[in-house]
Structure formats: C-alpha cells, structure tokens
Image (cartoon, grey):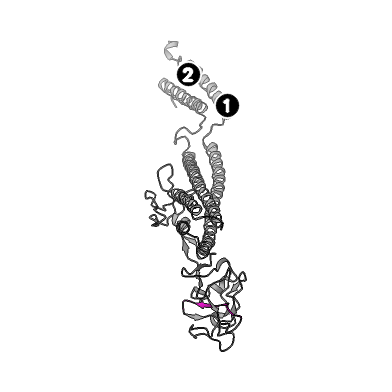
Amino acid sequence: MRISTGMIFDSGLTSLGKLSSQLLQTQQQLSTGRKVLTPADDPVAAVGILQANQAIDLTQQYKKAHDNANSTLAFVESQLKSAGDVLSEARTLVVQAGNPGLSDADRKSIAVQLRASFEHLLGLANTQDASGQFVFAGYQGNVQPFAGTVESGVAYFGDDGQRALQVSSSQQVAVSDSGNRIFNRIASGNGVFSLDYDSSNTGGARISGSNVVDAAAWHDASNSGHLEIRFWVDEMGTIGPQNAVYYDLVDAGTGFSLYRDPGDPLTAPSTAGGSDNTYTHAYVPGQPISFSGLDVAYGGGSFGANVMLTGQPADGDSFSLKSSGSQSVFETLSRFIQALEQPASGSHDQTRMSNEIALALGNFDQSEENFLAVRSGIGSRMNRIEMLETLNSDLNVQYQQRLSDLQDTDFAKALSDLMRTQIQLQAAQQSFAQTSKLSLFNYI
C-alpha cells in the first residue's frame, strides 16, 4: 500500500484532534463534576439521569405539600382548641348560673358573658387562613360559613366537603373539616337519647341525669324513639298513701303505655286489675326510673334507658326521651342565654332554670367530645403526613444516590485519564512534528 505525504498529514491531524477532544472532555468532566455532559456521551445513562431528576423534583413537590398540609392542619387544630376553651369557659358560667343565691341581675350578667362567648365562638367558626379562605366552609372557601345571632339562630352557608392535598403519588390528605360537622352535627343528650322537660310542667321535678343501659335495645325497631314519663298525684289515696306520686312510661309515638298490654290505649288511671295495667309505679326522688326490664312484652320489655329526677312533680307533669339527633353548639348557647335572661324568682322558675342547666351541660359535654374527636382526627392526619415525610426523605436519598451513580465524575479515574491523554497528545504532537519533516526533496 502506498502511503502518501498527504495521508501522513491527514492521519496525524485526525489523531491530534481526537486526542485534543478527549482531553477537553476529560477537563470538562473534572471541572463540572459530571461524567455525562451530553446525551451522546451515554444515551442509556442520560435517560436514567432524566428519570432520577424527575423523581427528585417530585419528592421536592411532595415535601412542599407536606409542609403546607402540616401548617394548615396545625392552624385548624389551634382554632378548634380555642373553640374548646371558649366552650369550657361557657360551661363554667352555666354551672355558676345554677347558684340558687343569684338574683335576676346576676344571671343577666352571666348572660352578657355568655353572649360574648357566643360571638367569640362564631368568630372562630368563621376563621380565615392566610390566603383569605374560610377554613370551616367545606369546598366553599370564599363563602363565610356561619351567620346569625342569639335570637335568630345561626345558619350554615358552607358545604360538607373536605379540601385535600396530594401528599404522595397515591395518597391525599384532608386539610380541612366541614363546619357543619364540627359546630352543627353534634349528638344531643347523651348521644343515644335526649331528655327534656315539658314547658307546661308546674311541679318541682328536676333532671338529675340519664344513662344508657343498652343502646341496642333503645335502637330496636319496636321503639318509636319518643318515650315519655307521665306523672299523676293520687290526692285521694285511692291506691296508696294520700298525695303519693306515681308515673307511667308511655310510647308517645303510639300513645300506648309501656306497662299495659300491647294495643291497650292510654286512658285515665284505673284502680282495677293488676300491676301491668295501672299506675302503680311509685315515684321516689333520686332513684332511677328504668325503661329496662319492663314487666310486659310490649317493645320487648326493654328500651335500655334509665332516667333520674329529683324534686316533686305535679299532677300532669311529664318528661320526654327522644332519639338523639343533631344539635348546634350555637343553638345550645342561644337557648340557655335566653332562658337565663328570663326572671327566675319563683320556685317554678328555679326548677325551669335547673332543668335548662342540666340540658345545657349535657349538650356542652357532647360538643366538647365532638371537638376532641375532630382534633383527634387532625392529629392522626398529621401523624400520617409525618410518616410520609420520612418515606419521602428516604426516597429522595435513594434518588440522589442513583443520580450520583449515573452522572457524577469518578475523579480518580478522570485524573488518570487526563494524565494518560496528555501523554498521548504530547507523544502524538512530537511524532507528528518529526514525520511532518519527511520529504523526498530533502534528499535530492
């Protein structure tokens, strides 16, 4: 094969250019710390680097979501804690209002303080976050959720939605709670049934307490959910001591006595027959009136409820037991404030006030439990976010390690390559300098 002078020059220049390019690339790898400078350097690694960078960016986005979720939930929890504190202070005022030595002016003074608590609680229910969104309005963040007064009641204008943030590729966490659930949908009474007095009562019987013996029995299909305790006074001593007080347990939904035979309508007291069809249940103040273990088959013989009353009822007085429904904390406060502002000088008024206090305290207990349940739910969500933060941090470390393996320069190897390429380039330059001097004309 004939090798021309031109071929020697071309081959030498190509080698010098290639070695210079290698030297430049190695210098760039050392200066940038990256071994893959362009996709052409390593297409497979370039794809892996792109995927790792995308995964890292995603973990950073989720970290921001975690921070936002934690901040929002902590803010909501602090507002609910404040609402619980307001309710606790109001409860103390309700207990204070039960002091029999208070005058009407004293009670009105307490009512003024409770009105302030009402307004404070209403303000907390209408809390806005830093962006101006109402936190207890459900999805309707731009709508004020609560509005009203003690006299007119409080209406809710939000919805039942829960705003959520995406905190992982497959999970969302709710960062808000509906004000309807927190402030309005609170179980009344003891959570199974609510005890109330008839506004037409004239006696001195007062609510002392109630308890659930068997919730399943109360919820049985045979129970209409509206029972009553009806009192009568045996003034003539027809079936016992003169002026003795007796009671009957009545299903107000059907109008039948729970102590009479099924289908026997409730009529005037009778002195004939046995104990299962007469008012022979003597009332003893402070002793439980049981709706369990009845002596007839009506309703299965049990409704799983006990009621305790103190004081003496008058003839015709009654108390009702209704299945627990939803009551608003604002409704509870409003009712008690308005009751407190009425004169309570006579014994009948004192009895009414005592019953209102018992009812308010029971509903306050349910409200506080509801606040605590919501706060507990918020706490569990914050714990969930904390676990996701840990997982997200671990994933970020793995992605960073993968990215480093794919793109970071091995400095020991790069320095070795740099030195080798420099030596090769120097040798190539020197040899080219020698070969480039070769010419036939030098020997003619």
- The three-letter amino acid code for the residue at tag 2 is Phe
Q: Quadrant of residue 281?
A: bottom right
Q: Earlier in the sequence, mark 2 or mark 1?
A: 1
Position of residue 414 relative to residue 160, above or below, is above
Element under disc 1: helix
Q: Pointers 2 and 1 in contact (CB under 8 A)? A: no
State which region is magenta.
241-253
Q: Quadrant of the N terminus?
A: top left
Label 2 belongs to which residue?
Answer: 432
User: Does residue 253 appear to the left or right of 414 in the view shown?
Assistant: left
**Labelled disc at residue 416:** 1
Magenta stretch encompasses residue 248: yes
Q: Is residue 175 visible?
A: no
Q: Nearer the viewer, residue 335 or 366?
A: 335
Query: What is the crowding at mark 1: few (fewer than 14 residues within 10 Å), some, or many (at least 20)?
Result: few
Residue 351: x percent and y percent?
53, 64
Position of residue 266 relative to residue 319, above or below, is below
Q: Residue at x 51, y 74 (%)?
A: 228
Element under disc 2: helix
Residue 174: x percent and y percent?
47, 52
Residue 224: x percent and y percent?
48, 75
- The three-letter amino acid code for the residue at tag 1 is Ser
Q: Quadrant of the C terminus?
A: top left
Magenta-colored segment: predominant secondary structure: strand
Task: From the image, state whether disc 2 or disc 1 is nearer to you.
Answer: 1
Q: Nearer the viewer, residue 113 or 61?
A: 113
Q: Nearer the viewer, residue 30 or 276?
A: 276
